[in-house]
């Protein structure tokens, strides 16, 4: 009894002929149809040629007697040659020459009467089971109308026709079989690269690594298929690598706050000596929960952005929409960080932007400013200045966010856009999740823009985001 199919498993396709068999079979059918049509045409041509040849022989046999009758008007006639069937019918019905087979002699009056003067009409006469081709030629002389009747057995013509038909059948059969065999061999040769491609794919699936499918030097459809599959393999490997890296990074980053939260709860349960201490432990646990929540939300946001990049999805906004969103984002930052000693300033566009379009949604542009402002404020726990500037330069939208938070540690700029990357000072102070700049970089990359970091250690950091207008040449890729 066959095993039941697993729920959700793809149903097996019905077994069909292989491509090789279908092409060879189709070629065989086409060759048969063409051969059948050619056989019918050739057979008709052969019959016509043989019949014309027999008529020419009969005309040749009759020619000597027709000429003699026209010149001699009933004079003595020579007997026909061996194998010639000739009958000369005089005006009075007598036959001075008659070598027709005995079976045809009784039909002679009908054969003569069947033709009108000046007509050459071949006819088939059945006599004694033997088919004859008969030609009657009327000759008008001074003494009356003579008829020269020539006959030829159809046996020879039938024999030749049968032999020609046999040769035609054998020849067409060989052509059909040769066509099918050629189609089979050519299809096998054409599908050989596909077979090798499938074997290579099986090897790759059995031992995944960095290898790719082999691409033939010939620029044919198989090579294009291999290149397309290699692009798919590269994308799938990159996606799987990102997923593994995300799981690894998330596990590493979640381990510490979860351990601290567990320890705080255990201490609150075992060692809380007063209500004040219990409240303090609960407040610490709440801060860790908030950090975990922010971390999970950032991970989800980053994963969503990478998914949009893989599907090449996005949006369009003009400069005026992005200007409004930038002002709203700055106001949100004022509201969020109003209690901190942060001097926040904003300088917007000088004009409407002449209707330029940019490949980014307004809310995503606001998220860029939100994350950059949050990172800057996190770097300035004791207060400082934060400046947001928006401008148009050579058809591109340029956003600058500058702070006075002391800048990045020397050499850290190369890793600042990576996930969970934090400087030693931020990591020691437990500030941030290390995902803010990674989220900004993902949004900017999806929009076809670039992000640059201008670091001044001990002074501050300036982040410059450049978004090209739609239709403009793409910006150079952001270094990661």
Image (cartoon, rainbow, N blue to C red):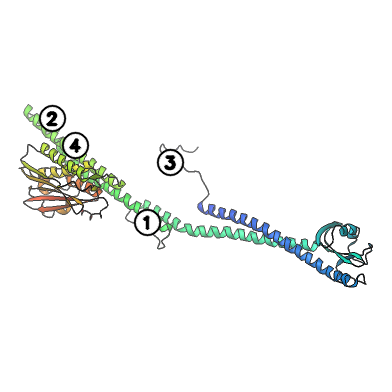
Direction front: furthest residue: 142
Please tell me whether residue 102 is drawn above or below residue 438 in the rendered image: below
Q: Which of marks 3 and 2 is nearer the N terminus?
A: 3
Q: Can residue 340 be seen in this view?
A: yes
Foreground mark, 2 or 4, reads: 4
| Residue where numbered disc 3 is placed | 10
Residue visible at 80% across and 67% down?
Answer: 57
Residue 293: which numbered mark, if any? 4
Residue visible at 70% across and 59% down?
Answer: 44
Decide: few, some or many residues near mark 3? Use Cα within 10 Å; few <14, some 14-19, many ≥20: few
Q: Do the residues labelled 3 and 4 touch (CB within 8 Å)?
A: no
In the visual, does 322 lie left or right of 310? left
Q: Dot 4 lies on which element? A: helix
Q: Which of marks 3 and 4 is nearer the N terminus?
A: 3
Q: Which of marks 1 and 4 is nearer the N terminus?
A: 1
Could you say where residue 238 lies in the image, as x and y percent from the top left?
A: 29, 50
Residue visible at 13% across and 41% down?
Answer: 330
Q: Do the residues labelled 3 and 2 touch (CB within 8 Å)?
A: no
Q: Dot 3 lies on which element? A: loop
Could you say where residue 318 lies in the image, as x and y percent from the top left?
A: 23, 45
Please tell me whether residue 140 is drawn above or below residue 296 in the rendered image: below
């Amino acid at each position: 009894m066959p095993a039941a199919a697993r729920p959700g498993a793809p149903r097996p396709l019905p077994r069909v002929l292989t491509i090789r068999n279908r092409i060879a079979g189709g070629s065989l059918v086409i060759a048969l149809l063409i051969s059948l049509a050619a056989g019918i045409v050739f057979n008709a041509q052969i019959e016509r040629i043989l019949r014309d040849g027999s008529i020419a022989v009969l005309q040749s046999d009759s020619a000597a007697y027709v000429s003699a009758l026209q010149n001699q008007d009933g004079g003595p006639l020579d007997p026909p040659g061996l194998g010639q069937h000739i009958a000369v019918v005089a005006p009075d019905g007598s036959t001075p020459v008659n070598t027709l087979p005995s079976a045809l002699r009784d039909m002679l009056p009908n054969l003569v009467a069947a033709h009108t003067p000046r007509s050459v009409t071949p006819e088939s006469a059945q006599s004694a089971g033997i088919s004859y081709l008969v030609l009657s030629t009327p000759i008008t002389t001074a003494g009356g109308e003579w008829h020269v009747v020539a006959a030829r057995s159809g046996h020879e013509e039938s024999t030749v026709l049968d032999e020609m038909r046999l040769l035609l059948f054998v020849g067409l059969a060989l052509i059909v079989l040769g066509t099918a065999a050629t189609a089979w061999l050519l299809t096998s040769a054409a599908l050989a690269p596909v077979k090798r491609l499938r074997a290579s794919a099986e090897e790759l699936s059995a031992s995944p690594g960095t290898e790719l499918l082999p691409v033939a030097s010939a620029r044919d459809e198989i090579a294009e298929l291999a290149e397309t599959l290699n692009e798919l393999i590269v994308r799938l490997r990159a996606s799987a690598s990102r997923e593994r890296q995300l799981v690894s990074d998330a596990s590493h980053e979640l381990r510490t706050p979860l351990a601290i939260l567990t320890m705080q709860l255990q201490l609150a349960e075992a060692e809380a000596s007063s209500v004040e201490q219990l409240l303090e432990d609960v407040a610490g646990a709440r801060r860790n929960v908030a950090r975990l929540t922010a971390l999970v939300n950032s991970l989800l946001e980053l994963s969503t952005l990478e998914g949009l990049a893989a599907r090449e999805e996005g949006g369009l906004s003009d400069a005026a929409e992005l200007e409004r969103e930038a002002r709203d984002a700055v106001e949100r930052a004022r509201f969020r960080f109003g209690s901190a000693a942060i001097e926040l300033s904003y300088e917007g566009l000088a004009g409407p932007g002449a209707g330029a379009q940019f490949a980014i949604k307004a809310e995503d542009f606001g998220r860029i400013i939100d994350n950059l402002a949050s990172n800057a404020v996190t770097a300035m726990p004791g207060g400082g200045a934060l400046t947001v500037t928006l401008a148009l330069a050579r058809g591109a939208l340029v956003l600058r966010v500058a702070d006075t938070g002391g800048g990045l540690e020397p050499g850290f700029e190369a890793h600042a856009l990576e996930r969970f990357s934090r400087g030693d000072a931020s990591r020691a102070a437990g500030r941030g999740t290390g995902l803010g700049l990674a989220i900004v970089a993902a949004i900017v990359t999806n929009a076809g823009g670039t992000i640059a970091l201008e670091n001044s250690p001990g002074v501050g950091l300036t982040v410059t985001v450049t978004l090209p207008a739609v239709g403009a040449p793409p910006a150079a890729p952001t270094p990661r």
